[in-house]
Amino acid sequence: MENSRFLLIALFGLVLFFPSCGGDEDNPDADDSSVVNPTPLAAFDEFNIDAVLVSFDGDEITIESNGLPNHTSPYWEETNPLYIEPVVAAHLTPGRIGGDRSFTLTVPAAPELATTSSATGLGPIGISVTGVPIFNDTEGPNRPLEEQIAETFDYAGAHNGPSGYHYHVESTDVPENTALSHDDEKLVGIMADGFLLYGRREMDGSYPTDLDGSGGHYGETIHSNGEKIYHYHIINEYYLGSIVVLFGGDLRGTPNNIL
Ligand SMILES: [Zn+2]
Ligand SMILES: [Zn+2]
């Protein structure tokens, strides 16, 4: 009698002493959206090393690109080995890939969601794994990607403009496309707020169902090694019947300038 009472008191003391025992630390349903995990470094192995230099400096990561893709396009000069006849483009915008360009983006190694989201502007809003800058869903001030513009995209979802060759939409599934994300879970690039942009699917092949208006959510990716990170997906929605915009929403983190 005396012994069992002592045992009860001892057990009670243990629970008080280790309050986390049986707590919700390992509860998969617990809301972990306040956890900020660093961007997995493995993601940067996906970038085209001929065009992109990634440097790590403490709590910052700098991505520097010359904007020259490692895939074929009708936007290359015809003398370039990567030049091909147009596969999907009905006509081309003026200018060709090349020139002495550079795009530099410095982001926090562990980006955080901002209290307010930011609309994207004209010009680069991210840098893709090929090194080509990512543009949004407009082609000029208040000018959406209308049919005549969509006709100028090559199979990579890009065309040429005053600031060079750039992507607006997801690549097309043609035999010529051997590298770029098309309706899959591959890494597409990194956005100006430091969050990664993935293809339309999750790593298990399913389409995510809990995306916010920017295509973002918390979850694992092929690079995060089981950790949940905030990341964007290409939203699985067709525009003008056949094209899928890479990123048409607001940035949920703090945008950094791409210079
Ligand atoms: Zn454009
Ligand atoms: Zn995801």
Image (cartoon, rainbow, N blue to C red):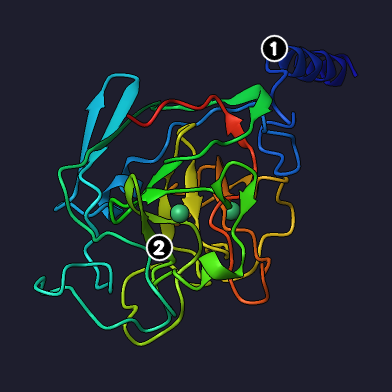
User: Quick one: quadrant of the C terminus?
Assistant: top left
- Judged left or right of residue 90, residue 106 is left
Residue 33: image location, x then y, percent: 67, 32
**Closer to the camera, 108 or 93?**
93
How far apart marks 1 and 2 lie (CA) works out to 61 Å
Residue farthest to the right, as pictured: 1
Residue 4: image location, x then y, percent: 85, 21
User: Quick one: quadrant of the N terminus?
Assistant: top right
Residue 178: image location, x then y, percent: 31, 78
Residue farthest to the front, as pictured: 94
Which of labels 1 and 2 is toward the front?
A: 2
Q: Mark 1 points at which residue?
A: 17
Q: Earlier in the sequence, mark 1 or mark 2?
A: 1
Q: Residue at x 32, y 61 (%)?
A: 94
Amino acid on which disc 1 is placed: Phe
Q: Mark 2 points at which residue?
A: 158
Quadrant of the image occupied by residue 54: top left
- When the figure is inspected, residue 237 is found, relative to residue 30, above or below; the finding is below
- Judged left or right of residue 39, residue 86 is left
Q: Quadrant of ligand 1?
A: bottom left
Q: Residue at x 49, y 49 (%)?
A: 197
Residue 238: image location, x then y, percent: 67, 70
